[in-house]
Amino acid sequence: MPQRRVRSRDEQRLLEKAKRYLPGGTLGNTRFADDVAFVVKAGQGSKVFDMSGNEYIDYLLGSGPMILGHAHPAVVTAVREYLERGSTYFTLNEPAIHLAETICQAVPCAEKIRFCSTGSEATFFALRAARTFTKKDKILKFEGGYHGSHDYALMSSSPSVPKDFPQAVPDSAGIPRVLEDQVLIAPFNDIETTSAIIERHHHELGGVIVEPFQRIITPRPGFLQGLREVTQRFAVPLIFDEVVTGFRLAWGGAQEYYGVVPDLAAFGKIIGGGFPLSAVVGHADLMEAFNPDREASGDFIAQIGTLNGNPVAAVAGLATLEQLKQDGTYRHLFSTGHALRQGLANLLKQYGMPGQVVGEDPLFDVVFTDEPVNDYRGVLTQNRELLRRFNGELLRRGILKGSSKMYVSVAHTLTDVEQTLAAVRESLEVMTKV
């Protein structure tokens, strides 16, 4: 039977206050049913704890930044020590310079870097840099790809009724209609269709942006290589959105892991160690558009942000990257993720569920369909009600995950995996009873 998690009066009052003051009672990110909603009090390692004292094994991980787990001692110590020196300056500071050096030395395409605060900002300015360089306005993105919440990004990231390629579908109210004609949509993992769109529109195409690992969908062999070839052939800048994959799949990100180097890339999440920090990186000729010396040239990108290169976030990012660089860290991360993935797949098969585990070892999820999942339309074939029930049953048993992702951290242990799989077994038992 589902485990009923008792809510204290204080937590219940906070939930009611959230509903009163926050639209939908949320921060705009996760949203849970009333019977399982909770308020986080603290996080430690692979766990978070709610205001009523309940414990959850956390595969949400703040939507990915907490790759070391919560409150990692090295990060806490670094931040605590730096706070004695201040919190932000709006000018050059030592930690930001050291972090810039670390990222540029690690990431294959990164010759120069410009910091910002969110992943949305990073992809927004990467696209602006590409358009500045090419003097062309249109961009191409992939159906189902998520690049943040700005207007260009929120095109066909989650269309319920997709249009024929390359037509875009706006995903949010308030997006200017004119932008529908400025964004071309291609199917992920289909290099033939994508190449044809690029060839037909290259004269007006300012850039191509892609999640090299799209949400949880792995690139087919040759897809990213083909995308790199066709964009180079037509001199269209290729942008990797590595906000999720950066320093997660490998030290050099997805471009190291998959062996394909773009012209520009957007980073976030891990590089801030749990604090607001992101970055645009890329080849020097494209990144020079951010140089203030070009202000009078007409090719200058004004990119001012109060917290650009915030020193506290940079310190947290440096401490996080230093831990990831230690020998065996990625091996442990992948091993733990593999054990959980394999266990999930075995249980789905054992209970005869129409589902599969899709993704890479550090990041994956169950997709409740027997159809191939190679692109967004493959994901659309899944039984959304089964996924909703699965997530809810897990949460009742103390397993926290996103609506369609499970992040693994260095802090997760095989004991966590065993407890998670026990909760999955109980959940599937409930779900398969008629």
Image (cartoon, rainbow, N blue to C red):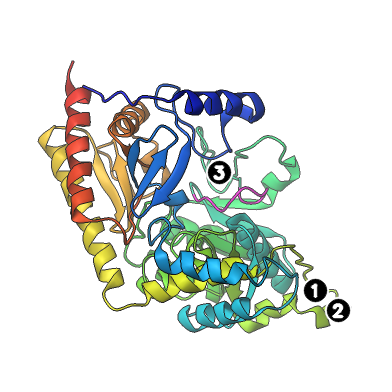
Look at mark 3 in the image and give the residue it sits on.
156
Q: Which residues are magenta?
A: 145-153
Please say if 157 is above or below 360. Answer: above
Please say if 299 is above or below 407. Answer: below
Q: Residues within 10 Å of mark 2 (few under 14, many from 20)?
A: few
Q: Quadrant of residue 255?
A: bottom left
Judged from the image, the secondary structure of the residue bearing numbered disc 3 is loop
Residue 404: percent from left, percent from top? 39, 41
Q: How many marks?
A: 3
Q: Residue at x 64, y 66 (%)?
A: 126
Residue 113: percent from left, percent from top? 62, 76
Q: Residues within 10 Å of mark 1 (few under 14, many from 20)?
A: some
Q: Are marks 1 and 2 in contact (CB under 8 Å)?
A: yes
Residue 244: percent from left, percent from top? 46, 59
Q: Is residue 128 left or right of residue 335?
A: right
What is the three-letter code of the residue carrying label 3? Ser
Tell me if residue 266 is in the magenta stretch.
Answer: no
Of all residues shown, which one is farthest toward the right? 296
Look at mark 1 in the image and give the residue it sits on.
300
Which quadrant is the C terminus positioned in? top left
**Quick one: label 1 or label 3, which is nearer the N terminus?**
3
Tell me if residue 150 is in the magenta stretch.
Answer: yes
